[in-house]
Amino acid sequence: MAQAVVWQKSSFSGGQDAPNCLELAMAEDGVLLRESDAPTQVLSATPTQLAALVWHLRCEAR
């Protein structure tokens, strides 16, 4: 039986009702990501891929 996906809004996404928030959920083989205003478009990433994405975004923000 498949488990229900439990989405959690990123702590960097502002208030509870803020639009365009990044949401994350755990999956068997990694992490699922989606934007709150497009909930049907889901990306999956391994922990290594997610770490690389976060590293890249942090470097670009500097």
Image (cartoon, rainbow, N blue to C red):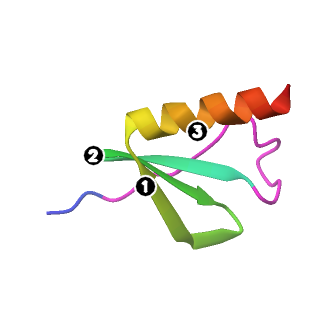
Callout 3: SS: helix
Which residue ends up furthest to the left in the rendered image? 1
Amino acid on which the number 1 mark rests in the picture:
Ser
Which numbered circle lies on residue 9?
A: none
Observer-side mark, 2 or 3, equals 3
Cβ atoms at labels 2 and 1 below 8 Å apart: yes
Q: Which mark is residue 29?
A: 2
Residue range in magenta is 4-20
Dot 1: element = strand
Q: Which of the two residues, 46 or 39, is positioned nearer the viewer here? A: 46
Residue type, label 2: Asp
Amino acid type assigned to the residue bearing label 3 in the image: Leu
Question: Going 60% across and 50% down the picture, which residue do you hit?
Answer: 23
Are the residues flagged by discs 3 and 1 in contact, CB closer than 8 Å?
no
Assess whether residue 19 is covered by the magenta stretch.
yes
> Which percent across, then down, holds residue 27?
33, 49
Residue 34: x and y, percent? 58, 59
**Overall secondary structure of the magenta stretch?**
loop
Q: CA distance from mark 2 to mark 3?
A: 17 Å
Relative to 42, 55 lies left or right: right
Task: Give me the residue at 40% from left, 35% from top.
Answer: 47
Where in the figure is residue 43, as x and y percent of width and height?
Answer: 49, 60
Q: Is residue 52 shown left or right of residue 37?
A: left
Q: Which mark is residue 44?
A: 1
Identify the residue at image location x=26%, y=57%: 3
Q: Quadrant of residue 26?
A: top left
- Frontmost residue, 52 versus 4: 52
Reading the image, the residue beneath label 3 is: 53
